[in-house]
Amino acid sequence: MKQTTLCYMERGRKYLMLHRVKKENDASQGKWIGVGGKCEADESPDECMLREVKEETGLTVTSWRYRGIVTFISDIWPCEYMHLFTADRWDGNETVCDEGDLQWIDKERLFDLTLWPGDRIFLRLLMDADQPFFSLKLVYRGDDLVSAKLDGQNLTL
């Protein structure tokens, strides 16, 4: 299974979001997501997240929390384990991303954006600071979310 990371950087009541509009053949084309990417050989999830955030934003994360693991099952895309993080401190200056447009979005406006259906589930979990580490399984048919399990329990879609 492919291993990836995704980090939602928090500044007050905003998340740094990436609007995926610059890469061709992008599974997330046109959608808004956090920053992250594929783990390289011999790289831990933390190391991957730190590298990907630096590559995509120019920022060096100095304080983060590992929030959960998301298992993606799809009929058209490779299955993957995505390690999910939030970050609240970093150094450096934000740069232009070659994969899309970075924008600080108010948390209240997140659900007005074009998101993957499963992202709507885990974003709600991330917004709860007391939410313990979680395991979320998302099953897609095409772009449609057909089932979801949170910590082994079926969720109503």
Image (cartoon, rainbow, N blue to C red):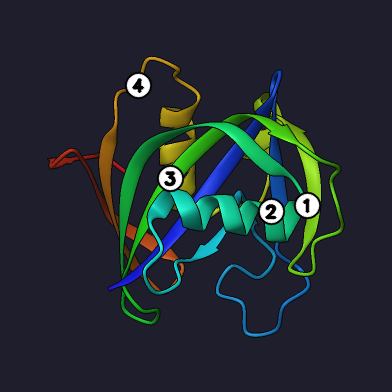
Residue lying furthest left:
152
Please tell me which residue lies in front, 4 or 104.
4
Q: Disc 4 versus disc 2: distance between alpha carbons?
A: 26 Å
Mark 4 vs mark 2: in front: 2
Q: Disc 2 versus disc 1: distance between alpha carbons?
A: 5 Å
- CB within 8 Å, label 4 to label 2: no
Q: Which residue is at a point 36% across and 69% down the rendered structure image?
A: 42
Secondary element type, mark 1 = loop
Mark 3 is surrounded, within 10 Å at the Cα level, by few (under 14), some (14 to 19) or many (20 or more) other residues, namely: many
Secondary element type, mark 3 = strand
Mark 4 vs mark 1: in front: 1
Secondary element type, mark 2 = helix
User: What type is the residue that disc 2 sits on?
Assistant: Lys
Kindly tell me whether residue 118 is visible in this rendering.
no
Q: Position of residue 1 (x, y in %)?
A: 27, 73
Mark 4 is surrounded, within 10 Å at the Cα level, by few (under 14), some (14 to 19) or many (20 or more) other residues, namely: few
Q: Disc 3 versus disc 4: distance between alpha carbons?
A: 13 Å
For the C terminus, the image quarter is top left
Secondary element type, mark 4 = loop
Q: Disc 4 versus disc 1: distance between alpha carbons?
A: 29 Å
- CB within 8 Å, label 2 to label 1: yes
User: What type is the residue that disc 1 sits on?
Assistant: Gly
Mark 2 is surrounded, within 10 Å at the Cα level, by few (under 14), some (14 to 19) or many (20 or more) other residues, namely: many
Q: Which residue is mark 1?
A: 58
Residue lying furthest front:
42
